Structure formats: C-alpha cells, structure tokens
Amino acid sequence: MTFLLEALLYLATGAFYWWWTQNLSFFGLAPDIIFAAALSAAILSGPVKAMTWGFFLGLYADLLGSGVFGGYALTYTLMAYAVYLVKRQFDMDSFFSQLVAALSLSWASMLFYMGLSLVFSRINPGSVKIFLVEPFLNALAVPALFYAFRRLKRRFGIL
Amino acid sequence: MSREKDAANYALIFFAVLSVLLLLFPSSRVAHTVRVIASYSLYPSLHYGADYTHFIRNVPANVLALLETDQENRALREKNRDLELKLQNLSVLAEDNARLSAEMKLSRYLPWTGAWARVVNKTPSDWYGSIFIDKGSDDGIAVNDTVLGMQGDTAALAGRVFEVYPKFSKVLLLTNAAASAVCSIVPSGVEALVEGRGTWLLKMNYVPEDSGLQEGAELETAKGGLLFPAGVPVGRVSRVYPKESSMNFITADVTPLVNVNTLKEVYVVHRSLPREISETGEATP
C-alpha cells in the first residue's frame, strides 16, 4: 500500500512539475519542483529511500529534457547521499537550513550536471539566467514541498 | 547505524553505477526513440536550439518526420485561428463599409446640407429617449438641428439635437415621450401631431375624423412645423383607433421608419432657424 502511495506521489510530483513549467513559468523561469522534491525526500527519508527517490525523480527529469540521459539521475542520487551525510551533523528540519541547503545544492547540482553534460555529450546546458535565478526559486519551493511531504509522511507513513 | 551506513553506501553504488551505465550506453535506437516520444508527449516542442541535433540523434527519420509534422500542424492550427479571427473582423468591416457606402450615396441626394455623425452612446434607462453622437459644436452642430437616420434607402426623421457640447451632442429621439413633430399624411396633406411615447411606437393625435386615415398610410414632416424641414419621412400608420365619444378627432399608432435599435450613424441637418424659434425649441423639448 505504501509503495502504491509513493508511486502515486511520484507521478503527482512529475505532473505538478509539468503543469508548473507549462503554465506558471515567467521569462522561462520556474522553480525546479523535481529538485525540490528530491531534496525534500532526502531530508525526510532514510538514505536508501532518499536515493531511490533521487534516482527516479532524476530519471523523470532526464526523460523530459534533451540533455544526457542519466545525468539528473546521477546528480540527484549523489545529492540524496550528500544530504544523508549532512543530516547526521545538522538539523535540516528548520526553514533556514532548508533554505541554505536548497541554495547551495541547486548551484552544486547545476554545476555537476553541466560537467556531466560536457563530458558525455559536449553540450553546455547552462544558462546564466537560470544559474542566477533558479536557485532562489528553488530555495522558496523546498520548504513548501518539504512541509507537504512531511504531512503526507505523518498521515500515510510514506517516504 | 553502521547497518544503515552500509545500506546507504550500497544504494549509492547501485544507483550511481546504474546512472553511469545510462550515461555511457544510452542510445539503443529503440530506447532513444521511446525517450524522445515520451518527452515530446509531455513537452510538444522541438525548439531545443543547439541541443536539437543531440536530441534527435538516433531517432528514425519517419518518427522525426512525424514529430515535425505535428509541430507544423500546431503552427498551422494557430495560424488558422488567427486567420479566422481576421476574417471575422473583415466581415464586420465589410458590413460597415457597405452600410456607410449606401448612406454616403444616399446623402448625396438629400436636399439638405449637414454632417455625418456616429452614435456613440445609448442610455439603457432612456433607450427610446435620447442618444449621444460624436459631433458637437466644434463640428458646427447646433441645438435643434434635425437628426436623420438611414433605414435602407430612405433617410427618415430620428429626432433633433437637444444639447451640444464641443465634441459630442445629445439627440432627443422622436420616440421620447417629450418629443413631437407636426406631420402630414401622404398624399392627402392632412396635418396632425405625432408624439413619442417612450416606446418603439409613436402616437398620432388630432387627426380629423373625416381624414380617411388608414393603416399603412405614410407620414412626413409638415410644412407647418418649423422645427423640422418639410418632407422628411417619419413613419407609417400601424393602427387607427376609432373616435371616442368625448373627442372630435381620432388617434393612431405610428411605426417610425427609423429603428432606434439599429441606429449606428445619423445625418445631422444644419438648420438656421430664427433665434426666437431656436430659443423656444430649447425651452420646450
């Protein structure tokens, strides 16, 4: 049952991300809901589940994009592992720590994905506009998504 | 804790290896095609700029042609929508053009000088009472100028200018309950008073019983009425009422020739009425 609910949440997250980017992006900018979901899941879940979420959410992002296939899957898997390591030292449930984590991990994952893309397909997917603005949008989206995920976790025992 | 750490490490290795495998061996023809189709289903766009060549690598030409056809189809549908909108606008313009041309042609044969004006406002609470036109004293419009409406190929009486402002004027319609005009029955020339009633019908009053008035009779402004030029068509008798015992005249309903509901442009006939008459007209609508 939990597995089904998690699959449903995964699909809902994907659909929400798709809807947001289709309807609510301004000047091509929108928070990366997939990233925010991966980070929220990483904060809330144990390491294995967090990485599973990161991998599959990354796979979804890869499927949608035109870049290297598997790039986001690797990036978000590593991000989930990094969060697991940081979580042991810091409390990541607070708003401020999520903000800092979202900002720093946004930039880190963008740079990492850019590196992967350059290595595997010699394409630079970076855009200055996205690099400068999106992390801040992500920083706002992460606490909101974290709150929603935590409620779901408490209510249905998922994540 | 150590167990969790081990599990985390195994999971990391498993997913990292899986991801790297996907990165290294991504593109069996079928897998990549499926990816492109799935991606296109969610984001129906092929505008990937510099990434486009990378995006379509390995995709069979027929699948690519299908996607490009879909893009073309979407663009054409959008263009078609725009064109339909333009067509609708054009048909409205064509209607306007035809109507205005007919009116212009008609105005050449009018025996009066005047100016065309557009109806710019109708008051919902006073629908049959008054209208506003877009010409005012700046255009030579004066109080009591006669206002004609075009109905088909006929210019007929609509009312008279009641208030004048620099850029616009208020027209008192003949259908206004306070408006009236001295009219004569065609061809007998018998004169009677046609009054507005605040509805689409006019009332004809003071018609002699022996005038032989019949339904369908046409009315035009009479020479005796100073406010309007003589000979302007007004309306047609739609119903004649029998004489009431207390009165020595009969009354009738008159359907005005000008339909207020379809009035879009009017022709304002410049009158140079003597000042005294003009002032009398201002005092009594």
Image: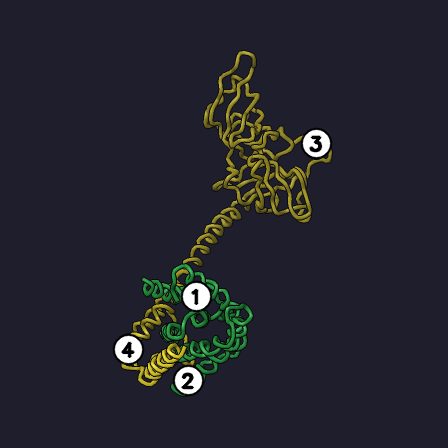
Badges 3 and 2, same chain: no
Residue at 51% of width from left, 15% of height from top?
B243
Badges 1 and 3, same chain: no
Amino acid type indicated by mark 3: Ala
Query: Is B138 drawn above or below residue B159 in the view shown?
Result: below
Q: Residues within 10 Å of mark 3 (few under 14, many from 20)?
A: few
Q: Tell whether B20 sits left or right of B226.
A: left
In the image, A54 versus B101, the foreground residue is: A54
Badges 4 and 1, same chain: no
Q: Which SS class for mark 1?
A: helix
Real-space Cα separation, disc 1 to disc 2, in angstroms: 26 Å
In the image, B191 versus B120, the foreground residue is: B120
Q: Which chain, by letter, is yellow? A: B
Subunit that carries the residue with mark 2: A
Give the number of the mark in front: 3 or 2.
2
Estimate the x, y position of residue B129 in percent, counting from the top left: 58, 35
Task: Specify the quadrant that holds the C terminus of chain A.
Answer: bottom left
Give the number of the mark in front: 1 or 2.
2
**Residue where numbered disc 3 is placed:** B283
Q: Which chain, by letter, is green? A: A
Real-space Cα separation, disc 4 to disc 1, in angstroms: 25 Å
Q: Is residue A69 visible?
A: no
Real-space Cα separation, disc 2 to disc 4, in angstroms: 20 Å
Give the number of the mark in front: 1 or 3.
1
Amino acid type indicated by mark 2: Leu
Q: Which of the 4 image quadrants contains residue A13?
A: bottom left
Give the number of the mark in front: 2 or 4.
2
Q: Residues within 10 Å of mark 2 (few under 14, many from 20)?
A: many
The numbered dot on residue A22 is 1
Real-space Cα separation, disc 4 to disc 3, in angstroms: 90 Å
The numbered dot on residue A116 is 2
